[in-house]
Structures are given as C-alpha cells and as structure tokens.
Image (tube, rainbow, N blue to C red):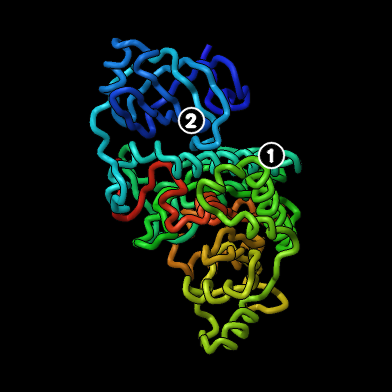
Amino acid sequence: MFISIKDAMKQGSGKVAVRGWIYRFRNSNKMAFLVLRDASDIIQCVVDREKIGEDVWKSVEKLLIESSVEIEGAIHEDKRAPTGYEIKVSNLNVVQFAEVFPITKDQSVEFLLDKRHLWIRSRKITAIMKIRSTVFSAIDDFFRSRGFYEVAPPILTPSSCEGGATLFEVKYFDDVAYLTQSWQLYAEAMIFSLEKIYCNSPCFRAEKSKTSRHLAEFYMAEMEVAWARLNDAVDYAEDLICFIVSRVLEKNEEELKILNRDIEKLKKIKKPFKRMTYTEVLEELKKDNIEIEWGKDLRTIEEDELMKKFDKPVIVTNYPKDIMAFYKPRDSKDPKTALCFDMLAPEGYGEIVGGSERDTNIEELKKSIKHKGEKQENYEWYLDTRRFGSVPHSGFGMGVERVVSWICGLDNIKDAIPFPRTMLRKNP
C-alpha cells in the first residue's frame, strides 16, 4: 500500500512504498541517488545496483527529472539527507520516463510564466499553493463560525460596480454583458434576506497595469452585513486578517520556511491595528516631506512610505467622497469624506482590504450615479433595495492573492495564483 512521503517519514523506519516524481537525480556506475517528491514532501532514495538487479538498474539509468516512479524500500533516519530521512530502494517501477525537463536553474520570470504548467510543480509554488489553500479554508471557517451564509454571486453582470473603465465586455447572445468586478451590488440585495453573507469568488478588472500587485483575474473574499456601520465592517476585517495569519502559522510553518519567510513578522499580526483618517495620513506623510494635495487618491508610493512606519496593517478611513465609488456615503461629520476604509499591509504590500458603509439615501445615490457618468436605468434594480425597507449596512472585499502574497513574502502577486492573468498574459 502506497503512503505519502510525509507519512513515510512519520513512520520513521521499516518497509514503505511511496510514489511520485523525480525531483533531483545523480548516479554513478554503482549507486543512484534519487530525490522523490509528492504533494506532501521530498525524500532521498538510494538505489544500489548490486541489490536492485540489472533489469531495474537499466530503467534507473534512463531516468530524468520529473519521471514518475513507484518505490519500495526501507526508510531510516539520515541527517545528511535533504529532509532527514532516506529510503534504501528494494524495488522501483517507472510509470513514465520523462523527456528532458525544459526548466533549469536561473530562468527568467517570463520564461517561468510561459512554462507555468510545469513550474507549478516547483517546491516554491507548491508551498504557496498550500498556504493559499489554508487561506481559503480560513475564510470559510471565519465567516461560518460567525453566523454568515455563503452566497454565490453572478459572474456575468449587466453594469459596472467599480467603474466602467475596468470592465471586461463579453458577448451575451445578441447583447453584451460584463465580467463581474465585485459581488457587492448583488450582496446588498441579499442582506435583506440573509442579513450576514459572504463569498470568495473570482473577480475581473481590465486595469491597464503592469505592476507586481495587479491581476486581471483574482479572487476576492467579500462580506456584507445588515444593520452594520463602518466600524463594524472594520472590526470584521481586522478579525479576519488576524484569523487568517494565525491559521497559516498553525498549519504552514514548513511551507513558510521553504519560502524563507520571516515568521516572526507574521507573529506580530495581532489586534489592534492602527486606525487613521485619510487627512491624518497626509499629515503623517508631510513629516517626511511628502506633499499630497487633499482630494488626490493615495498612490502605491505614498502607501509604501506610510507603511515603513508600521509592522502591522494600518486601517485608513474617510477618503475624499469625490474619488470614491458611487455607493459610498458621505460622512455627516465630515461631508467632504466618505464612510469608507482601506487596510494597508506592512512590508510594501499595499491595500489588502477595502470597504465602506453603503449609501441608503436614494437621491444621493442617483446624484452619485450621474456624477460617475453612469446611466440610472442600469441601476434601477439596485435602487429598488432603497425603496423597500432600506436599512444601514456595510461590507468589504479582501484581495485573496494580495493577502497570500503578503503572508508568503512574494516579490510578485503572479505567484499567488496558479495561472495568472494580466494585461500582457492569458496563457498558458
């Protein structure tokens, strides 16, 4: 019976049967040293020509990186081996002899993206995908444990949510539709039924950006809560991020080590997070001779400068109303600002969560829709939610790949998703 490499190492001694792919290989006339990998780990396997027999040895000599094999043998502890254990092979069956693997050391980033279907087998990407899986699971556990219902939003939508300039248009029978930018408008309709809802689903933004932080297709964990105010949404966001980081530290210590991630930095991610208004951020940046005209959005460079001062996320509230999405209401205490927030991650990873209260004033919504250059008739169904039993409500969206990128300490967000889609890449 075959077991995983990790389970074989837990067994520690005796006979084992494992299977996987050749990760590393070197041999001489008498001995071969195979490093085998599977989804769980890697292990060194030693083949002795005299003990294995000539027929099997002939197969061993033809092995190349990524050949798939089944191995039986005796496992024992060996501190010199890559993961501290070694299997002395008694039998080896080749499932498939691989061709020469095209990926070698020191390949360019673009080449590795071209060969993503193969590079995804690397220990680095495997470690990231395991952490990503933990993040997805943590999102579900967090919301379900707090009484939220999961709702699946439509992917095809009739209009924009975050601005028409970043919409992907698709043919829809004899009409056109758009790939969703966010579930939010639909979530606002659903809270009148279920009150506390969440989703974790793909979103699409046709942003003409080539930065290390942007994807055209990404996952966003979103929530919406009836009766909630801005501070309630901020509290949920703070709790969610702490919960995710704690879960990754609990489940993925080995993967974080593979990625050379400084775990001590992640251990600091605990409540409370610093909270500042947009205006206070401008004052803070002014101390470093960074002058920003009030009313301009914070750029990446300014967010990064601010976050050099902090080792935990920072929550920035009350951005200028005029640069916000139409559904974000004015703050009655400071009408030139909106009741909204962004959460910025430390170490230069930028915005990871964005949210707000939702405007419940139908006339203000109509003005904002017109101000944004949108047609009111496209939003009549949305305005109906304000005509029939409107209540205060709030929500946010968390960029899953941005969170994964930050937790893993990645140089580029493209490694935080299995097959990245960007302005310049739709393959493989």
| Image x and y of residue 356, in percent | 64, 62
Q: Is residue 36 above or below residue 17?
A: below
When asked about the image quadrant of residue 97, the answer is top left
Q: Residue at x 48, y 30 (%)?
A: 43
Count of labels in the image:
2
Q: Do callouts 1 and 2 mark residues in contact (Cβ within 8 Å)?
A: no
Q: Is residue 129 above or below residue 2?
A: below
Label 1, on which residue?
Answer: 141
Left or right position of 277 against 400: right
Which of the numbered marks, if any, corresponds to residue 331? none
Front residue of this view, candidates 94 and 174: 94
Q: Residue at x 29, y 41 (%)?
A: 103
| Image x and y of residue 276, in percent | 67, 74
Placement of the C terminus among the 4 image quadrants: top left
Q: Is residue 291 above or below residue 427?
A: below
When asked about the image quadrant of residue 48, the answer is top left
Left or right position of 55 against 317: left
Which of the numbered marks, if any, corresponds to residue 43? 2
Q: Residues within 10 Å of mark 2 (few under 14, many from 20)?
A: many
Q: Amino acid at mark 1?
A: Asp
Q: Residue at x 56, y 24 (%)?
A: 76
Front residue of this view, candidates 222 and 130: 130
